[in-house]
Image (cartoon, grey):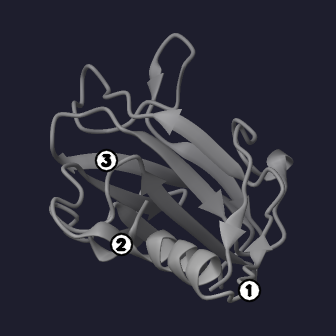
C-alpha cells in the first residue's frame, strides 16, 4: 500500500478514527487499451485495425461543448510512492477535421506521474475531432485508460464506443 493507505490503516486500527471516502462514477465513459504501436509510424497507438491501422479515435464534439479526457497508465505514481515513478512517457493530442492540432498534453512523465489530461471547448461548428495517443519515451506497452469527464457524451459520440468502466476518487 502507498503512504495514504498506510496512514488510514494506522489511524483506523490503532487510534479509533473513522475514515470515509467518496468516489465518482462516470459509468462506462472510458476506454481501456494496451499500447500497440503502429508498424509504419512507430510511436502512435493503433485504436483498431480494419485492414489498415487506425491511429486516432474519432469523437463528435458539438458546438459549445467542452471535451475533457484523462489518460493514466499502469506505472507507479511518483507523487504517491516516490521513486521510481513512470518509466514510459505517453502523450495525448486532439486534432480537428483539417488535421490541425487543437489541444495537446505532453507532460514529461519519466520518473514522475503516468498521467496526461486535455480539456478543449469547441467554439467552432459541431464536428468530428481525432484523439491520438503517442509514446514519446520508453519501450513498454503499458495498459492505459482514457477517461472522458467533460461534456455530455455517450458511446455514440465515439468512433469505437467505450470499453472501460470508471470509478474515481473525489478531487
Describe the element under mark 1 as helix, strand or loop: loop
* Tally of marks: 3
Instruction: Judge by depth and name the residue closer to the eye, 85 or 155.
Output: 85
Q: Is residue 106 visible in this depiction of the protein?
A: no
Specify the label residue 129 is tagged with: none
At label 3, counting other C-alpha atoms closer than 10 Å, the crowd grade (few under 14, some 14-19, many 20 or more) is many
Q: Position of residue 25 (x, y in %)?
A: 80, 65
Marks 1/2: CA distance? 22 Å
Give the residue number, with chain letter if any, for mark 3.
134
Instruction: Judge by depth and name the residue closer to the eye, 110 or 85.
Output: 85
Give the residue number, with chain letter if any, for mark 2.
80
Marks 2/3: CA distance? 25 Å
Q: Which-is-in-front pick, marks 1 and 3?
A: 1
Side of 116 relative to 8 (left or right): left
Q: Is residue 147 visible in this depiction of the protein?
A: yes
Give the residue number, with chain letter if any, for mark 1.
18
Query: Within the image, what quadrant is residue 107 found in?
Result: bottom left
The relative height of residue 130 versus residue 54 in the rendered view (above or below) is below
The relative height of residue 77 versus residue 86 in the rendered view (above or below) is below
Marks 1/3: CA distance? 43 Å
The disc, 2 or 3, on the residue closer to the chain's N-terminal end is: 2
Q: Which-is-in-front pick, marks 2 and 3?
A: 2
The disc, 1 or 2, on the residue closer to the chain's N-terminal end is: 1
Amino acid at each position: 500500500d502507498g503512504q495514504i493507505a498506510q496512514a488510514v490503516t494506522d489511524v483506523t486500527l490503532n487510534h479509533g478514527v473513522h475514515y470515509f471516502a467518496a468516489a465518482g462514477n462516470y459509468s462506462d465513459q472510458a476506454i481501456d487499451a494496451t499500447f500497440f504501436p503502429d508498424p509504419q509510424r512507430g510511436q502512435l497507438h493503433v485504436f483498431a485495425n480494419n485492414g489498415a491501422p487506425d491511429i486516432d479515435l474519432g469523437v463528435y464534439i458539438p458546438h459549445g461543448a467542452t471535451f475533457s479526457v484523462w489518460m493514466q497508465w499502469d506505472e507507479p505514481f511518483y507523487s504517491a510512492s516516490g521513486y521510481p515513478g513512470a518509466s514510459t512517457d505517453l502523450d495525448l493530442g486532439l486534432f480537428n477535421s483539417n488535421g490541425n492540432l487543437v489541444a495537446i498534453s505532453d507532460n514529461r512523465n519519466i520518473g514522475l506521474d503516468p498521467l496526461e489530461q486535455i480539456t478543449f471547448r469547441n467554439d467552432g461548428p459541431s464536428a468530428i475531432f481525432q484523439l491520438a495517443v503517442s509514446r514519446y519515451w520508453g519501450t513498454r506497452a503499458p495498459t492505459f485508460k482514457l477517461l472522458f469527464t467533460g461534456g455530455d457524451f455517450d458511446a455514440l459520440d465515439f468512433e469505437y464506443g467505450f470499453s472501460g468502466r470508471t470509478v474515481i476518487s473525489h478531487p
